Amino acid sequence: MASGGSDIQHGFPHLDTVRAALTALFRRLSRDTVGAFGTSVLPVDVAFDDTEDIHLGAQRVARAMVHQLRLPDARIVITFREMEHAAHVELTAGPEYFVELNERFKKHRKDIGAALAHEVTHVYLHRLDLSFPGTRDNEILTDTATTYLGAGWLLLDAYREHGPFSQKLGYLTPEEFGYVLAKRAEFFDEDPAPWFTSPQAYEAYLTGRARARQDARRPPLAAAGWAARLRYAKDRRRAQERGRTAGPAAGDGYAFEPAAGAGPPARVSFPCPACWQRIRVPVRGRLQARCGLCGTLLDCDT
């Protein structure tokens, strides 16, 4: 948790790691398994009022997260204590779940669901044996997985700024949470916008969505803008003249590959805008390509 506006980072400083996390998630789970998470945890499942017993309510919300992530039903033990971080989970082989929550959540009950979403996802990834090296990258993987698998909109909604008070949960910036939510919304055709109670969270979602939509307008995708198309055509001519591999263009990520190591470019590779897996297609004008990892069908103009 952060307090004080200067403590909250904005923008997209972790975008490369977020994209790597999306690729890793599809590789580890498969397209069909990811597709089973088409419905997010709903606001009614995590609603928490002042009349409900704090421990029973936290267990109820934790159980909703366990169900969302298709984890086994088991005993859930939740305790509250003073601590630096928002929460901590004990990573064991299971089946029980042991979670510690910051004492502050006793006064901020509406954010208990966000903290539990992140911690239960830690358990899910641990049992999948999916992790990134280093604490920072592994936490970004966890935030990305939480969001893409349908529980992370709560983490973004926990971002609020009211005068001198500010709060954000998770390691992603608010805009990066919005970016991943927009990727999920596009893939599952699910709009999370009506669920936000924080105006700042909604604005961050819109910013992240705009950034996510840029990914679908990068050449050689047919939806690319005219300036990007001109740059792509120039790079393709350069590759034809050189008769060898032309590396990725700055900011676009495509690369031309010659046939049999020489001659004009026969293929172009580029990242899938949905899962960021690299795709290779022939250089021959308009065509459709399907990502072999996430199954997204892409209109291309190579």
Image (tube, rainbow, N blue to C red):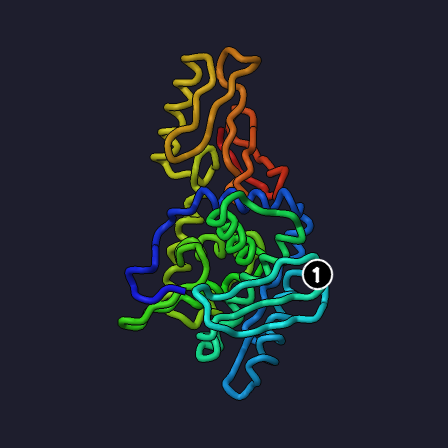
Instruction: Identify the residue at horizontal 38%, vertical 67% (top origin).
Output: 167
* Quadrant assignment, res 189: bottom right
Instruction: Identify the residue at horizontal 31%, vertical 72% (top origin).
Output: 162
Q: Position of residue 3 (x, y in %)?
A: 34, 67
* Quadrant assignment, res 27: top right
Instruction: Identify the residue at horizontal 57%, vertical 85% (top origin).
Output: 53
- Per the image, the residue denoted by label 1 is 94
Q: Position of residue 60 (x, y in %)?
A: 62, 76
Q: Left or right: where does residue 277 sit relative to residue 199?
A: right
At label 1, the amino acid type is Gly
**Residue situated furthest bottom in the rendering:** 51
Q: Left or right: where does residue 53 sit relative to residue 234?
A: right
Q: Quadrant of the N terminus?
A: bottom left
Q: Is residue 152 above or below residue 22?
A: below
Q: Position of residue 190 (x, y in %)?
A: 55, 60
**Residue situated furthest front in the rendering:** 82
Q: Nearer the viewer, residue 214 or 91?
A: 91
- Residue count near mark 1 (Cα–Cα under 10 Å), binned few <14, some 14–19, many ≥20: few
Q: Nearer the viewer, residue 122 or 147?
A: 122
Q: Left or right: where does residue 54 sit relative to residue 247?
A: right
* Quadrant assignment, res 177: bottom left
Under circle 1, the secondary element is: loop
